Amino acid sequence: MASEVTHLVIFTPSGKRGRFPTGTPVLTAARQLGVDLDSVCGGRGICSRCQITPSFGEFSKHGVVVKPDALSEWNAVEERYKSKRGLIEGRRLGCQATVQGDVVIDVPPESQVHRQVVRKRAEAREIVLNTSTKLYYVEVEEPDMHEPSGDLERLCKALDEQWNIKGLHADLNVLSYLQKTLRKGEWKVTCAIHSGSGLRPPSIMNVWPGYYEGSIYGLAVDLGSTTIAAHLCDLQSGEVIASSGVMNPQIRFGEDLMSRVSYSMMNPGGAAEMTRVVREAMNALFTQIATEAGIDKHLIVDTVFVCNPVMHHLFIGVDPYELGQAPFALATSNSLSLEASALELDLHPLARTYILPCIAGHVGADAAAVALSEAPNLSEDLVLVVDVGTNAEILLGNKEKVLACSSPTGPAFEGAQISSGQRAAPGAIERVEVDPVTKDPRFKVIGSDLWSDEEGFSEAIGKTGITGICGSGIIELVAEMRLAGIVDGPGLIGSPDQTGTDRCFLDGRTYSYLVWDGTATGGPKITVTNRDIREIQMAKAALYSGARLLMDKFGVETVDRIVLAGAFGAHISPKHAMVLGMIPDCKLEKVTSAGNAAGTGARIALLNTDARREIERVVKDIHKIETAIEPRFQEHFINASNIPNSVEPFPILESIVTLPDVNFNTGGDRESGAEGGGRRRRRSAR
Amino acid sequence: MASEVTHLVIFTPSGKRGRFPTGTPVLTAARQLGVDLDSVCGGRGICSRCQITPSFGEFSKHGVVVKPDALSEWNAVEERYKSKRGLIEGRRLGCQATVQGDVVIDVPPESQVHRQVVRKRAEAREIVLNTSTKLYYVEVEEPDMHEPSGDLERLCKALDEQWNIKGLHADLNVLSYLQKTLRKGEWKVTCAIHSGSGLRPPSIMNVWPGYYEGSIYGLAVDLGSTTIAAHLCDLQSGEVIASSGVMNPQIRFGEDLMSRVSYSMMNPGGAAEMTRVVREAMNALFTQIATEAGIDKHLIVDTVFVCNPVMHHLFIGVDPYELGQAPFALATSNSLSLEASALELDLHPLARTYILPCIAGHVGADAAAVALSEAPNLSEDLVLVVDVGTNAEILLGNKEKVLACSSPTGPAFEGAQISSGQRAAPGAIERVEVDPVTKDPRFKVIGSDLWSDEEGFSEAIGKTGITGICGSGIIELVAEMRLAGIVDGPGLIGSPDQTGTDRCFLDGRTYSYLVWDGTATGGPKITVTNRDIREIQMAKAALYSGARLLMDKFGVETVDRIVLAGAFGAHISPKHAMVLGMIPDCKLEKVTSAGNAAGTGARIALLNTDARREIERVVKDIHKIETAIEPRFQEHFINASNIPNSVEPFPILESIVTLPDVNFNTGGDRESGAEGGGRRRRRSAR
């Protein structure tokens, strides 16, 4: 069919161009030029992945005029496809349309194998789709008695000849149904092939008879101390088709990491029990998310997990004992490529699991995932990335160098260990303002857009009512109390006389502040006690000290920008975080939120296997700082418990807000704001 | 310690030599010269694997005089080792003794890594020890908080630095106890490392604290249609430490292969049921064999299986449906490298399984194992290898070319489908002679060395008595009956008149021959019926036809030598096999027995991983002949049912024995000897 007459074919958006004989299919031209044009069926007009949009007319930019007959006429295969499944106006099938004249051909994003996955944040790096497992349609030779070879060997031969996939492995699971499937598909099948990893060959994950029209899926999971959050992704489109989370059931063995380590130390079989419950919770979550998305969970062929080292070890079935004491030795620090079944996950029988590498004994795969998502190693300016959680991961760096540490903030930021604290859920106070004159608060609760002093607030919150204060609420509240002069720098709540409001009341040996009294309608009385302030001080001091320690190690006094990460980090008001002294001084507009960056990192690693190799390289270059043995960390910690720390300069903050110069310590026997013993006790429990 | 003065060091038996400075440890010199000197501890004086024997005096052959002080003095490490475990007189530890002068050093076989494993048969090829899994002692760096890395990563680093083992994989199973083991061994551990295979990286199988003094084990298993035979081998010495066998419990679903295939076709779940029972039987056998050898079966880290295609598929969990009909397509023909746990084998949790490649749909991994053991592909002369079993595998070839086929002999050769037949067990008649004059038999039974007409025979056989005739017994008996003129060429037993003995008696419509009447003492009456003769004729015709077909394809009328293999093949008398016409005409001294060659092949593949690569290559070059579709096979089969076939020339045989020219067919309605319908029915059931 092809003649010696050649035509100029220009592909957009790549700009790749070449001359091809009359009759060359567009898909063939694209492949020869290395244009990223998808195909599962190998040009047989079945899969429609190779859709392209030819452009006609004069293209001065390209110096070419495209005539209406530059491509072959619409053919029967395209007609059938269009009538059966529909085809966007102007689209052609790249394997059917052949070159008949000079032509400009656009490859729409959904026809690109390595298409970009949309991310909501403008500043975020792109995710290029390159999943571990892809679909391939092949035609297999029938068996021949005179040249005996196994069905599997002929399938592998076909995959080599038609897709250039070599050295394939097949599990017994595939062998168990392969013969029936090949015959049912009349020697035409679709294979899901895992491309392999450093140590492992490519392998056949699944075989369907004929052309398989469905998709395959993957899970990106952020296994946190408190919550397990999962994104279910379509591995062909890269899209998140469902997201869900559950509480980590290990909470019943201890709220924070060290109490779980202690539990395993104190209880024979305790570690195994925690392993069991977290795997069970995973399976329940995966069943739920698959049901929600309306897919068969046995189509989930790949999973990526990120987690801190203790969660990591408990998940893979290693007693975290050594992580509870210096030198905090990990059983393994490298990334892990496993069978999901080795973790007792009930997904596709051959589903794989990839767990990102850990950075150090206290800086886990979750921090690696944050590094992958926020890429401080690629940043021109100096960025501080703070992943706020029960254990905070902190990264500081730029393209020259990246430092990392973790800091045990405890669960206060998640609303735990706070008298009126609760998890972020409807009814929780999440935003607060305190009037500097009246000292009265106004607030918003999750589930309503109205402030508490706005008309219709009571109706808006409905039956749920006001149930407590979540992490972001308590941060704003303490910061606002400080700004309103209700709390002094060392962290003491003033008396009614000192503050001029009856909302402050003696509560034991210290004062508390009344936020909301719902008792008249059977609701709770929501207060902030001086112990709550202490908890927040401990937590923020831990966070701040970690960041300061990295800044010391980097030899800087300020950072160019700050990224707050973590499901909770997304909801923190930068101003209040700075008033509280959680984060170093920085221009407010340079403080951004990355949402669940660890979860995003997991999703990147799920969708792009190159990113796995990338983070493995990056992690090796990250310089780890162990806060537990750094004397400067303790020093910073003690200094940082004030709100904000008067020792450290906050010039930018002071240009925005005025911090009242109050001191409520009357020299009595009340706790000293700078004491910080609770935190130190927790640390020494390691 | 080493000075610039160098000395000549000559190693025997390798003859490797080099000059080394004063003070060089012998082990170091050996390693530099590539001398095969074992060491598990890496020269730390712990393992004593590097024992050597220095020779002193004048060696004109090597042109060297070795003085008594050519090696350093006996040292404290050697003294301690000798007092604790003993050391053969004259032996030194190669890692302790250092070179002080010119010296000749012998490496005894047990100090060689790649030592030869003794085989009983003179003509058999050597087995060079090179197992998949070996032991390595290492010293691991302790963790350092400032340079965080996982314990596993430091172990891998040590294995790389001390043993040059790279790219190691470790399973979660190892990770689960690694940290405790490293600390228990004070950062010194012994690792069992699987060297990996084509598609898989080397991996850590087990870690023991300190120096592990025990061994690791492997199983070579011949999974036959009728019996499962296993050899338990010490992977360090290569020795078989126990052998055992059990009946294949699949027998209850069908005696021969095709009836099992039929069972799976007729019964939903039938294949899965047969998979389950054979795996259960394996586990029971392995427990028994480990108990017998007094080892923990969880120290069994490697297994090799050989089996015919139907057994192969049922074992790996593939329905053998396709093997029951043309074109007899295998699900997979290549070798399989699996986790033993994938086959539900309860051995070491990370134990591996290697299954040899299949040659074709009817020529399995057992035939490949026979090829590995008997190496027709390396033979200068033309060798016919016949593995006699329920399904016979036949190989014919020399170093130019090897042909293979299988032939469904049925279970008659194993004593089944024979009226007085039984398996080879005490009480079974295994050797027979029939007096050509009196027509009376004399025989030997398993468990006694006496002939039945010798003094003390009754006492020797004791309580067991005479219970039946085993496979080798029935072959000899039928051949002897033919030689004595009791049976004619077409296979009919003569009447008392025709044969001149009352041992022949009318039994239905044909005659039977009385071998032994034990009814007086409550024992059985052992006879040979004309139907028994038919069964043997069918079986031997199938075997002979397969061999003849390969000879046709090879273009030869005779072969240079014949190897009878199979547990049963070992007991066949070559003369009787030839009288019966089981095997082609050949000089009797050129007919040898290889015992269970398939099992030996499995043992070779277990002990030497290079042999696995070798047989994979060899199998690809073997030319497969499918008997089921070869018209010449049917032709040979019909011609071959006579005893022996008068159509085919047996000149050598006729120079040894005289075949009586008798014909008992009186033209009546009795079965025709050349009919062979039963066999054809079985074949057509495919």
Image (tube, coloured by chain):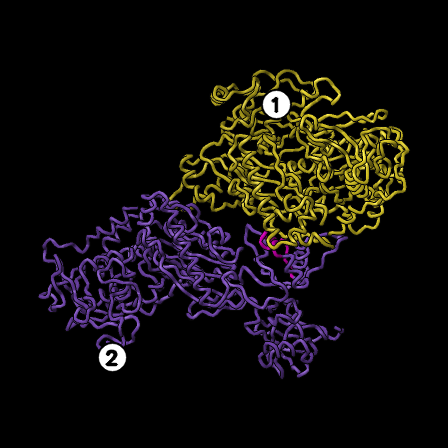
Chain colours: A purple, B yellow
Tag 1, which secondary structure? Answer: strand
Residue A278 horizontal side relative to residue A530, left or right: right
Subunit under mark 1: B
Tag 2, which secondary structure? Answer: loop
What stretch of residues is rendered in magenta? A163-177
Residue nearest the observer in this picture, A571 or A445: A445
**Residue B196 shows up from this direction:** no
Snapshot quadrant of residue B551: top right
In this rendering, the answer to whether B269 lies above or below B179 is below
| Residue A332 x %, y % | 44, 47
Residue B529 horizontal side relative to residue A467, left or right: right
Q: Residue at x 27, y 65 (%)?
A: A470
Residue nearest the observer in this picture, B91 or B579: B579
**Could you confirm whether marks 1 and 2 are on the same chain?**
no
Snapshot quadrant of residue B586: top right
Residue nearest the observer in this picture, B405 or B109: B405
Q: Residue at x 68, y 38 (%)?
A: B598
Disc nearest the viewer among 1 and 2: 2
Residue nearest the observer in this picture, A138 or A607: A138
| Residue A484 x %, y % | 18, 68
Q: Identify which amino acid the numbered label 1 is placed on.
A: Ile
**What number is the disc on residue A27?**
none
Q: Quadrant of the N terminus of chain A?
A: bottom right
In this rendering, the answer to whether B473 lies above or below A319 is above
Residue under pointer 1? B105
**What number is the disc on residue A456?**
2
The answer to if B616 sits in the magenta stretch is no
Residue B194 horizontal side relative to residue B511, left or right: left
